[in-house]
Amino acid sequence: MKESSSLRRSALALALLSLSGSALAATCASAHPDEKTHKLYLLFPSAPLSYPSFGFSAASATDPAARFSAADLPGFSGSTDALREAITDAVAQDYCGLNVQVLDTASLPPAIHAHRNIVAVTTASDVSEGLFGYSQNTDVGDREAVDYSYVWAKTYQDWAGGALSGANSTLQRWANAIAGTAAHESGHNYGLAHSAAIDKADVRQHLMAAGSGIDAETRAGGDRYFGDREYSWLAANLGLSMQTMWNWELVNPNATAAHSIELRVLHPSRTAPSLDGAYAGCGSPWLAPVVTGPVGPAESAQGGTYYPYLITWSAPNPAWGTGECAGAAGAPGQAAGGARFYVGASFMASQFDLSTSESLLLQSVVLRDGAGKAMGLNPRVHAFDAGSFDEAGNWNIGVSNPGPVPLRVQNLRMRELARPLAQEQLTVRGRLLDLHGRDVLVWPGGDRDFGGTTTPPAEAWTVPAGKVGEERHDYDVVDTSDCDDSFLRIVDTKRCGSGAVVGLFPSTAVYFTADSTDPQATYWDPGKRQYLRGALTTRTYYQLSGHRLDRNRNGIDDYIEARQAR
């Protein structure tokens, strides 16, 4: 039952750039969901079917799995299909941003995916034992590739009272309640115990809080979610959907409008980087970037082999210059001369490996006119790599200058986050909010300013961003006491795993912001209606996934082994 230059600083720039911190509509779409390696199946049987047996009594029997039918819920007046769809959508929101694809099915899924977590969602009841759900295993570290759990949705009918009756008997409230249990029990199978829900005074909104403390109204009407530590440990066990996320805040330095923008990047794989999402705020003239390539032979960079790709934005954004971005120069699909604008995208890894990261090295930015020809002037931006470890155990970020003139990097700031920021918040006025508009925690001590330096052409600044042996933000030891309880004090998982848990290094997500200034740029000033020569600043907003430190590849984070050896 158990269930966060002067031109750049001008008033015009600040008015155009971005969404404010207001919460965005909750969506959780990935451009390539099938590439996620962990599959969470919500099984809605239309009739009883054979299922693994792990219940502890006749009332909690899991074999066969009972049917899922709205007819078994007299307090609910909607359709079975609508409730099934709403539950699936709600669970997908709970796992948003993680390397998990949530799928619904009416039959047991085939064994085609190595990592499968199956939750039988039924409309049976186990109110006599106080169970809404039951998991096969609190799988600390997510060591088992295939796990099962079970949901008794009719327990809500028999227990919830007014929270799910009368005017409160809505599709969304029923879906909230049932999906919360499904996410909670699958969370056990992904390695979470109830002790994960300890990072906030009021833990009732946290999905892994012990069930006996969660009332019916919180289950049905609340916005329950994985808390910071819960999400941190899920990220360590499963990985994040995005590996790197970028927004670039750029200026069209030409007097005429740019109709598209093309970024040339280097990627360490013959397989193109997969888009996980893209910036779609009103601060961009374009939507839906396209990745093409490789567009040439392999190249050497940073001591390795890389392949060149193009990322192109050309599809007009109808929201450009509207709403909170009103006043932007240019029609949708055009950045007028002197206009400041954003483009951005997030990328999945070509293969999920939390021990290594795949760099996406920016090489050039090319603006194109209405005929597709390269324009005479283009923005200059630094390239950031995904970090590397030296022999002393330092994690270093490389900030390089791929351009032909010296660039100043300034205001480099790094923040260690408990969960990723929403792409739309990677802007000058963006706030530290996730996709659902919830505050994102910066771990204590995890906010650092590195200042800046001048980088000559083809040279890099190495930034010491972390050290392997430093204390981690989210270490804990789980034991069997963390498996309690249902509201009748019955443990809600058959096997209570134990062991140490820790998040990614140095945190779930790491967020960098930095300015790149060309001190002798030529650019069009739309106010003075002339070209000027002087400092022109652009900005990079860069978020990347943390690492699992496991040098001996035994499946245990090196930090856990070091703590246990003390």
Image (tube, helix red, strand yellow):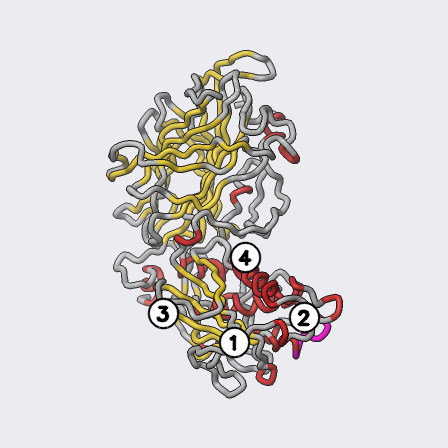
| Res 270 → quadrant | top left
Cα–Cα span, label 1 and label 2: 19 Å
Q: Nearer the viewer, residue 356 or 135?
A: 135
Label 4 vs 1, first from the N-terminus: 1
Work out whether mark 2 precedes mark 4 in sequence or the reverse, and give the earlier one: 2
User: Residue under circle 3?
Assistant: 144
Q: Amino acid at mark 3?
A: Glu
Would residue 456 be visible to someone looking at this image? yes
**Residue marked by disc 1:** 47
Which residue is label 2 attached to? 76
Would residue 156 appear left or right of 257 to someone viewing this image? Answer: right
Q: Residue 45, how many percent across, how many down? A: 51, 72
Q: Residue furthest top?
A: 530
Q: Amino acid at mark 4?
A: Gln
Identified at 51% across, 50% down, the residue is 29
Label 3 and label 2: CA atoms lie apart by 36 Å
Task: Using a 10 Å C-alpha cutoff, classify the residue at mark 1 as few (fewer than 14 neighbours), some (14 to 19) or many (20 or more).
Answer: some
Q: Which residue is mark 4?
A: 93
Element type at marker 2?
Answer: loop
Where does residue 79 sit, x and y in percent of width and height?
63, 66
Q: Is residue 477 visible?
A: no
